Every structure is written in C-alpha cells, then in structure tokens.
Amino acid sequence: MPVLSQDECAPWLALARVKGLGGVGLKKLIGRFGDARAIFSLAPSDLAEVEGLHRDVADEIVGFSNWAEVDAEIGRARAAGIAIVPFGAAEYPERLRMIADPPACLYIKGGLVAGDDRAVAIVGSRSSSDYGRRVARDLARGLASLGFTVVSGMARGIDGAAHESALQAGGRTIAVLGSGVERAYPSEHELLYRRIAAGGAVISELPIGTRPMAFNFPARNRLISGLSLGVIVVEATEKSGSLITAASALEQGREVFAVPGQVGSSRSRGAHRLIRQGAKLVETVEDVVEEIAPQLSARAAGARLAAPELAANASAAARTIFALLSDSSLHVDQVIEQSGLPASRVLETLLELELQGLLHQAPGKIYSAAR
Amino acid sequence: MPVLSQDECAPWLALARVKGLGGVGLKKLIGRFGDARAIFSLAPSDLAEVEGLHRDVADEIVGFSNWAEVDAEIGRARAAGIAIVPFGAAEYPERLRMIADPPACLYIKGGLVAGDDRAVAIVGSRSSSDYGRRVARDLARGLASLGFTVVSGMARGIDGAAHESALQAGGRTIAVLGSGVERAYPSEHELLYRRIAAGGAVISELPIGTRPMAFNFPARNRLISGLSLGVIVVEATEKSGSLITAASALEQGREVFAVPGQVGSSRSRGAHRLIRQGAKLVETVEDVVEEIAPQLSARAAGARLAAPELAANASAAARTIFALLSDSSLHVDQVIEQSGLPASRVLETLLELELQGLLHQAPGKIYSAAR
C-alpha cells in the first residue's frame, strides 16, 4: 500500500502527540492551514485565529519539540511492518475522514483496498451465546460474499465470530483495536490476528506499544462505526460497549441494525432497546443491504460524470441485463424471461449492478437503469 | 348481566340476518334512524335516503320476514344460558362500538364487567414453541395482575396459554370465538372454555350452532383487536392469522406490540416483520403499559368533570401519595422519602394512580397530579 514517506508522516504523528488536541481540533487546523508540517512553523498569533482552539493547545503546538520520539515511532513501525497512514494521505479512509473527530494517524497491519469503503460493522458481546455467534457468522458470511468488508473489534465472542466467518468466506475484514496495532489481544486471537493482517487489515490509532486498556475502547468504537456504512449489533447486554458503537454510528449518520433474540435473555436486552429506539431489526443480510443500497447507489451516481457505464470487465450477464434495462423498466420476472439467463444468475447480477449504482430498483421489484 | 329483553333483541338479531348488511351499513342505519325496530317499518323510499346502502340490502330489510328464526334463536340462547347483547344496548362494549364494522349482536357466555374496557389482546401461533408460550404466560400474568383483561382467540398454543395464565393470576379474560359461542373449540380446550365462561366471558358474533370454519376467523380477529387497547403478537409465522389481528388493530387505531424471538425461527418471522413495520417491541408488561397508559389517563381525564379525585375506597398509601403530589411534582425517590412508605408499595401505588389517570409521569420519573 502506498503511503506518505516517513518524513511526511512525522508532522501527523506529532499532531497526534499534542496534548489536548483531538480530532475536532485537528480538522480545524487542517481546514485552516492545509498541511500538517506548516502548522509547526506557525506563530502563536496565527494559531490564535483558529476558532475554538484552546490557548494551551496552541502553546503545545508552538512548543512541540519531541521529534525524537516521533522518529523513534517511525522506526518502530518500520521494524514491525506497520504502515502509518496520516489524515492527509490519499489512502486515509474517506468515510473516516468525514467523522467529527478523526484520528491524525492510523497504524495499519495488512492493508486497505478501495473496496473497503463498502464496509459494514458487526459487533456484540464478548460473553455471547451460541445463537449470537451463529447469527454473527451468517451475517458476516453473507456480507463478505456480497463483496462487503466486515469491520469489528477482534474481541471474544461476536467480534471474533464475524472476522472468522468473513475470512472463511474469502472476504475482506478489518479489525480495529483498542491497543497498539502490534498486539494480538485477546491472546487466544493470536492466529486470527495474523490471518486478518494477512487477508485484510488490523487498525489502531494508538501508538505502538499501547496496552489494551478498557478506557481506550469507547474511542476505538467510533472508528469501527466511522469506517462503516452501518453497524449491526448482534448481542449486547444493557451495558455493552456495542451500544457505544451504535451511538457513535448514529452521531456519524451511519445506519444502526440490531439482531433480536429471546425475551428474557440478558444478552439480547441491549439489541432490543436499540430496536425500540429505532434501530432496524435484522434477520438476514438482505435486511442490511436493502437499507444501505440507496447510499451506495447515490454515491456511485455522484461519482459518475455522464450516463452510467458498465465496468470494462463486466460479465456477459451484466452486459445483457444492463442492455435490457437501458431502454425500459422491467419486472424481475421479465428480466429473467427476456435475458434467457438462469434466475439465480439474474438475481445476483441485478444486486451487483444495483450496488454499483447502475440500476435502480423501484417497489415491486421493478428495475431500471440509474439516471 | 342486565341485557335488553328478548323482545328488544329481536330486531338486532334480524339486522344480523339481513343479507349484505355488514357492520358499516348497520352503523349508517342506526346513525340515521336511531332504533333497530324502527328500521323494519320503514318504506323503501326512507331507506333509499341512506347514502351507500345498496338497493338489494334495502329490499332485504323491507322484505324481512324470518321472525320465526329470530324467535327460535332467542329460545336457543335462553336454553343454553347465552346472553345476547345488541349494538344498541348499554352493555355493548364501548370500544367495539367504535370500530368501522361492529357486529349487530354479541352472543356471550359468562359476562362482561366495567373493567373489561381495560383489555389487552395476546395472540399468536397455534404451533407455538415452549418459548412463545412462556412469554405469553408471563405477559398474561403481568397484565392480569395489573387489572387488565386479557383477550384472545382460545386457539391452541399462544391463545390458550394467555387465557390460562390470566385465570391462574385471578384476572379477567375474554375468549372471542370464530364459531357459535356454545362450542368449545378446539375440544382439548373444553375445560378452559368452561373456566373462561365462569370467570370471564366467551364471545361470538356468529349464530348459535355455527361450526368453526376457517373463513370466519379473519372477521373474528377484528373483534379481538376491537375489544382491546392493544394487541400483542407473541409468535407468528409469516402467514399467521395473528398478522390479520395486528392489521385490524392498526385500522382500528389500537396499539400493536410484537415479541421478538431468535432469527431463523419461522415462528418469530411474522413478529419481526411487524416490528420492522413499526410495531413496538415488547419484552415485559411495562413496555405495554408505558404505551397504553397515556390513553387510559386521557380517558380518565375526559371522564372527570372537575379536578381528579381519589376513589372512595382508595388505600391509605394512595391517599398519602396523592396528597403529596397534589401540590408539587416529585421525583419517585422523593415520593418514597416523603411518604415514609416502603419503596415497593410506593411504586405499585404510583402505577395504580397513573393507570387511573390521577397522576402524570414525566420523563425522568417525575410524578405530578393529573390536571
């Protein structure tokens, strides 16, 4: 994965070390001065112009001198095969850049790919039930096989089941840690950690060497939702950290989904509360896709300059169906009939084209080309 | 239970026998002419003035001559200890009178009491699971012990569990049948039928002798919801009759509640669909009461002519708490402290007074006297 040179990372790592400067302040500074390096050569009077930037924080920036520690961190990252992706880099996840308080730097084991912007988080209790893990696995497998990246926190229980199942389905998965990115925590997930790093990405905003401390986990949860189009809460007690992830998702304008369970199971109480508060009840992957497909379509539409066009490597089925629908709106049964393709192939291709923003589905399973 | 004399019932039974005249037409006729008997001495020209009344139906009324059958039905009811409660009687349930298509007559084994206007329906699958029946029992017991009447359809599974549990809790329960009211159907519910008739009411709109036929059940379901403030669907497949009851409840402006279950259980799919469509997810009786308490309070407020007053037989605790709250709004903890009563007694009494419409609860558990 191409990242900024170590030299370019340095000022971002420095910003991450400025006491009292969070993601909100970071966005203000970058919005005002454009570049991380420039910020460290500013006069106090320049920084005083940034609305809402506390005087103490400005003093910390002007007086920042710990470049040795920054260089040491760059050295540690290089030695451990950890990429540092600063807020200013093109590789920084676009969706995460949009949240109110993004990290100045991400530490990454493994790598991000373009398709990771189609991510859905699956989170839940560490003390999960067989039922909860089964549902988490089914959802992760389904999302992975539709090309979604599955994001979670690599904890025991639901998180682990979701990562595991996404990998087994040959899909992408991202683990966001509440410790330094080099730590496989919990230790029983050592092997899982290595597999995620090999086939996806392990991410943290915390400096290398940071131990897993409970007080870092809520902040970590905002990254899980921040990387994702939506968050599925599978099992959660009433005090579960998953509810913090759900709350972050709401603040960030992401979808919140919750999986129901039996009344009387304390493990489902948090999910039930979310549903009562408006989270969408999820039984299957289709329930999730139905809700996020419009966002994907809108994004794809926004990215197009002219009429929708098939990718150069589109399948023959996609070409046939896209041609059929370019002139007229058709019911799914008509598409099957007129295309002469097997029904399962047609359904799969329609979903694919819809997710690419090339087709629009109207109520009653009527498809037409997106305009 | 006092009802109209047999003679007074006759014209209502006759209206119930007029072909093509449903509850909608019935309401129009009574709205226009006031009295059932008068309708049978009208000229065709009088009936022609009723907007939307089909000419054929008017002819049926003018030509109605089957009074012998009506008298025979009255005789059968008397012999079987069945009360007939016509739409025009004061004993006809007020809430049922408000629906779009009320029955002209109700056949009743047992009897209705004033408190039956505080009814909640619990319905669900005949092929229920242990889990479903357990939740139905818990909810029925809880509602019964709060003084609610539990309405259901006396079917196997959820319905039976709900009736049974309400009776065991010493509460009121009403079974609405899709056959003649004299039939204990299914036969395994023979004993349950007798206990409901003894301690509550079995109700049907169908003539004595009508066999339980599936096509009568959807119409029956509108009476289950029509008698109730809300309907709780416990377990329902996607084609369950309980979904018809839920749809009736929505049409009638009643609350719809659904109990979640595990994803993958076909028995919970209908309930999950209802929740996605906006039904309130229910875990406990409190979830139900919370939703219907405002209706009860509003009704109680409407029924009062002046300031809220305690019942003459109110408990000492009720008097103490009501006096405390008549001057000021208090947090529940303050009520406990200032009343000097045990916390459990205070909570129970607060709920009781709230359900009577005498207290208002604001968010944050702040109580004040209803104005």
Image (cartoon, coloured by chain):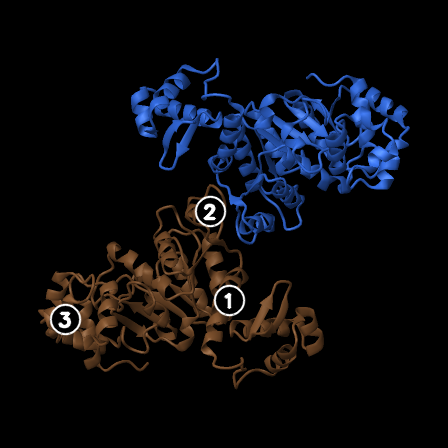
Chain colours: A blue, B brown
Q: Counting residues from the N terminus, which is met first, the one under dot 2 or under dot 3?
A: 3
Q: Badge 3, how many Cα within 10 Å: few under 14, some, many 20+?
A: few
Any part of residue B9 in sight:
yes
Task: Tell me the residue at 62%/21% (across/down).
Answer: A113
Q: Amino acid at mark 3?
A: Asp
* First in sequence: mark 3 vs mark 1: 3
Q: Is label 2 in a helix, a strand or a loop?
A: helix
**Residues at marks 2 and 3, CA–CA distance in whole angstroms:** 49 Å
Question: Subunit of mark 1?
Answer: B
Labels 1 and 2 in the same subunit? yes
Is residue B44 depicted above or below B321 in this figure?
above
Residue in view at x 36 percent, y 75 percent: B112
Marked residue nearer the N-terminal end (1 or 2): 2
Q: Which residue is mark 3?
A: B46
Depth check: give the residue in front, B351 or B343: B351
User: In the visual, does B144 lie left or right of B344?
Assistant: left
Q: Nearer the viewer, mark 3 or mark 1?
A: 3
The residue wearing badge 1 is B294
Q: Picture quarter containing residue B323?
A: bottom right
* Residue B276: % across, % down: 46, 47
User: What amino acid type is highlighted by mark number 1?
Assistant: Pro
Name the residue beneath numbered marker 2.
Answer: B276
Q: Position of residue B55 (x, y in %)?
A: 13, 62
Q: Quadrant of the C terminus of chain A?
A: top left
